[in-house]
């Protein structure tokens, strides 16, 4: 049954991918990308990878669709005729795909407990998560602590992306030039009663879900990345309903920059505190008298940092695009 | 080792990385000072690490105190230390000298974003150099790439945007290839730690996934390192970036990717995949030779000075790869030494360009007319760095080319052909450097160009520091030589004889 469902999802994914490449209307392509992300998320869920499925759904299908649409609104909807040579690209891509497919035949059987990925490091993670952290979600233990340095790096990747968009879009014509704000930016969908009522009803629940995922990461799937994306989505929904300017009034750009930078500083700062207390960088065991408590405290704090930076960056990017349009 | 000294590998990355978000929050006037201070501190840490490596061998560090391969391990060996000195040195020199030039390129209200991106680029490159974990290298590659796209797009020249878009697309393809390769290796070995991978890959070596992974990783990194013919993103990115950013990135960015390529190839693949050394040479040597000849050839006919130097970089990457493709102690010593020496020469040249740019609008060869009179001191430094680029005796460039020639001699008859290529490449370098000198000494200054260049003092000092370093390390190459021969020994220590 799982196999059948998997084949079904992947076939749909393939069809969607071809449709994305063939779509000449970029709006259609963006919508199809959202569908592709949702299909990937479903496939992840089918493989019991709940954490990545949640991330893919929140980031891929959710926020990035909104960001693509904001980008589209400052450019044209039609794709320009490409000047590149499609035949050469096709040959290269096909060759690369064939190599990957070929090497997939040599991969361990799906779900094989003897596979290297299951037999080498995983037993240690499973054992030590209980011993050092006493939390049920091993994915959070690996991401937050055992490989916490990678996650710190990912936070800085997100920060770098935010800095890049703010830097690039804060120049040239159309930025804060004192031009009058178009009516939609002030009012959003304010005059459309049904989306507004339904949307406003949803926002508190989305925020609550975001906070739940943020602080429940040790116990269930989730964590700062997903929570940040969901909270940002709630604010963006508010912006769409009430007007982007109103959202910016509640969370102005300095606050968003503070969130962006503050989250990264919080995460890195926890690492430095670990150093000052006599451990290595990102050693949470020294954060409390009881190493287990220290690990739990460290993971909670760094997840908060992740959530802050992701929320701040996503909203900054959204507002930067909107500002370009003004 | 004192507790602080033991923390150096982590601090090498953490200091510039954590300063970046602070730069976003600080008052705008302080951005440059904060970035320069963090960069200088990082340089101090790199020097300290290099001293430790020379005295007592490689340094290892466990992130979060988790033992390798379960946690992420950092490891600084001679090659890493050499690279760290290059990366942090280039960043510091460019920042200290570049304040005025950058202020002209980046408007004040957004300069804090620029300096934050600079620090992230520095932290990303340093993070790659200290890491001993394949996936961690990918994460820091992403940080450095995203940040360097911002640096390249930073200037007022709108042509930078298409250039950076190309750079972004090709960089993303390169990083994705690397990630696919790591994924395949992880599937077959279950580990991400490079040393652990080396041990575990032996049992599964000649299986399809590992062979495919070797291909993906080599091609992906070659793309990021701008190895001919995958260099097409480089010339325009270097040409249209702000001059100071070009000086920083040209000195070290591609070398960090070369470093990962060498490390991965020699530590993980060489001794495990049958016949890999031969394939490595057979694949890279022709590309290196073509890179030297085509890069130098295009540079000879290029009219824009920055693009001329960028194509010369393609050729110089060719020399580094040529040394590596010999898979011998001599070749690898020459390759790693040339990474250091080329950074000195090219960093100095681009810094001088930054100083000359205000009086040579457009930076075409004819705009350089009369530069030897208009900016005699700066141009003299430019010539010194140019001589090092050619490889004139007495300069750093000569030392690495000499080692490269001696390494080629060991090959016997085919080595003579390689030496021929090197001599030809150097002669071509004489031509393209001479074209700039000719215009500067004998050309007429363009009309209504400023007669004398007012070079800010810090920039002048930075340029001369780079020029004198080219001479110093040409006469006394002991320090980089010790690091690169030890790097070569450790790279080759993994290859069965």
Image: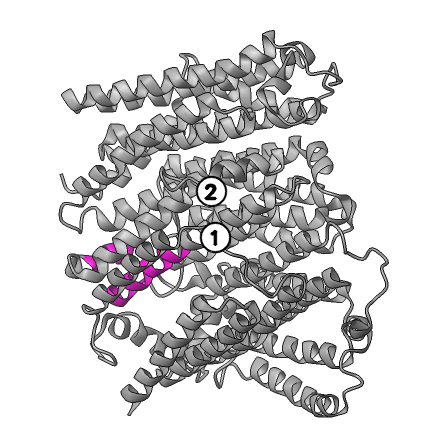
As drawn, A184 above or below B47: below
Q: Quadrant of residue B153?
A: top right
Measured as percent of width and height from the top left, residue A317 is found at 66, 64
Q: Quadrant of residue A254?
A: bottom right
Query: Which is more toward the observer, B262 or A23?
Result: A23
Q: Is residue B109 left or right of residue B53?
A: right
Question: Which segment is the magenta one?
Answer: B175-201
As drawn, B226 above or below B460: below
Report the residue at 44% width, 35% height from top.
B51
| Label pair 1/2, CB-CB below 8 angstroms | yes
| Chain-order first, disc 1 or disc 2 | 1
Decide if residue B23 is in sight here: yes
Residue B169: give its label: 1
Q: Residues within 10 Å of mark 1 (few under 14, many from 20)?
A: few
**Label 1 marks which chain's residue?**
B
Report the residue at 72% width, 18% height from top.
B453
Element carrying mark 2: loop
Q: Quadrant of residue B495?
A: top left
Which residue is the site of mark 2?
Answer: B233
Decide if residue B471 is in sight here: no
**Label 2 marks which chain's residue?**
B
């Amino acid at each position: 049954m799982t196999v059948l469902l998997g084949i079904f999802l992947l076939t749909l994914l393939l069809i969607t991918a071809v449709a994305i490449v063939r779509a000449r209307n970029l709006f259609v392509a963006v919508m199809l990308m959202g569908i592709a992300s949702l299909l990937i998320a479903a496939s992840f869920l089918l493989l019991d990878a709940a954490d990545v499925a949640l991330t893919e759904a929140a980031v891929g299908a959710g926020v990035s669709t909104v960001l693509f649409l904001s980008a589209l609104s400052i450019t044209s909807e039609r794709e320009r005729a490409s000047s590149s040579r499609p035949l050469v690209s096709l040959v290269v891509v096909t060759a690369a795909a064939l190599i990957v497919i070929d090497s997939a035949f040599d991969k361990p059987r799906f779900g094989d407990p003897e596979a290297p990925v299951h037999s080498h490091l995983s037993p240690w993670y499973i054992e030590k998560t209980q011993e050092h952290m006493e939390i049920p979600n091993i994915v959070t233990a690996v991401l937050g602590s055992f490989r916490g340095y990678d996650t710190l790096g990912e936070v800085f990747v997100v920060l770098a992306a935010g800095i890049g968009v703010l830097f690039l879009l804060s120049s040239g014509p159309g930025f804060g030039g004192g031009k009058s704000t178009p009516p939609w930016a002030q009012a959003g969908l304010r005059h459309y009663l049904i989306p507004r009522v339904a949307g406003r009803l949803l926002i508190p629940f989305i925020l609550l879900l975001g906070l739940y995922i943020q602080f429940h990461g040790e116990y269930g799937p989730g964590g700062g990345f997903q929570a940040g994306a969901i909270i940002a989505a709630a604010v963006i929904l508010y912006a769409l309903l009430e007007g982007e300017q109103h959202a910016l009034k509640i969370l102005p750009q300095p606050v968003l920059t503070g969130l962006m930078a503050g989250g990264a500083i919080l995460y890195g700062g926890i690492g430095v505190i670990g150093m000052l207390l006599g451990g290595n960088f990102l050693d949470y065991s020294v954060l409390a008298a009881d190493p287990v408590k220290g690990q739990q405290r460290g993971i909670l704090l760094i997840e908060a940092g992740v959530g802050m930076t992701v929320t701040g960056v996503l909203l900054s990017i959204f507002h930067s695009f909107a500002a370009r349009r003004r | 080792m004192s507790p602080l000294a033991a923390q150096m590998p982590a601090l090498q990355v953490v200091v510039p990385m954590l300063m970046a978000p602070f730069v976003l929050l600080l008052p705008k006037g302080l951005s440059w000072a904060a970035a320069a201070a963090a960069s200088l501190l990082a340089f101090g840490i790199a020097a300290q690490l290099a001293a430790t490596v020379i005295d007592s061998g490689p340094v290892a560090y466990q992130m979060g105190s988790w033992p390798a391969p379960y946690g992420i391990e950092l490891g600084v060996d001679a090659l890493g230390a050499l690279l760290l000195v290059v990366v942090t040195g280039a960043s510091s020199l460019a920042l200290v000298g570049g304040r005025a030039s950058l202020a002209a390129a980046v408007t004040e209200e957004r300069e804090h974003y620029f300096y934050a991106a600079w620090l992230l680029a520095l932290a990303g490159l340093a993070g790659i150099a200290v890491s001993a974990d394949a996936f961690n290298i990918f994460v820091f590659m992403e940080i450095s790439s995203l940040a360097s796209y911002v640096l390249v797009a930073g200037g007022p020249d709108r042509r930078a945007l298409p250039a950076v878009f190309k750079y972004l697309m090709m960089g993303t393809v390169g990083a994705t290839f690397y990630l696919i390769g790591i994924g395949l290796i992880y599937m077959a070995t279950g580990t991400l730690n490079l040393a652990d991978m080396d041990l575990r890959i032996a049992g599964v070596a000649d299986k399809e996934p590992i062979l495919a992974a070797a291909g993906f990783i080599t091609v992906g990194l070659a793309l990021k390192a701008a190895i001919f013919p995958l260099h097409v993103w480089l010339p325009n990115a270097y040409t249209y970036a702000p001059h100071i950013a070009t000086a920083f990135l040209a000195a070290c960015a591609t070398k960090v990717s070369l470093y990962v390529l060498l490390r991965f190839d020699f530590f993980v693949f060489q001794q495990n995949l049958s016949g890999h050394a031969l394939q490595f040479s057979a694949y890279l040597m022709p590309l290196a030779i073509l890179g030297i000849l085509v890069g130098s050839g295009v540079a000879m006919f290029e009219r824009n000075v920055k693009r001329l130097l960028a194509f010369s970089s393609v050729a110089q990457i060719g020399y580094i790869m040529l040394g590596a493709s010999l898979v011998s102690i001599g070749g690898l010593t020459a390759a790693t030494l040339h990474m250091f020496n080329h950074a000195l020469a090219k960093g100095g040249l681009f810094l001088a360009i930054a100083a000359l740019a205000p009086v040579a609008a457009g930076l075409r060869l004819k705009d350089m007319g009369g530069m030897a009179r208009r900016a005699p001191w700066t141009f003299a430094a430019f010539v010194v760095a140019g001589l090092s680029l050619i490889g004139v005796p007495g300069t750093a460039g000569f030392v690495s080319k000499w080692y490269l020639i001696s390494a080629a001699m060991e090959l016997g008859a085919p080595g003579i052909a390689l030496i021929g290529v090197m001599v030809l490449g150097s002669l071509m370098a004489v031509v393209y450097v001479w074209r700039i000198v000719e215009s500067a000494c004998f050309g007429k200054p363009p009309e209504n160009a400023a007669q004398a260049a007012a070079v800010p003092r810090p920039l002048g000092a930075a340029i001369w520091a780079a020029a004198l370093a080219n001479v110093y390390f040409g006469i006394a190459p002991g320090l980089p030589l010790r690091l690169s021969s030890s790097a070569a020994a450790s790279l080759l220590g993994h290859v069965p004889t």
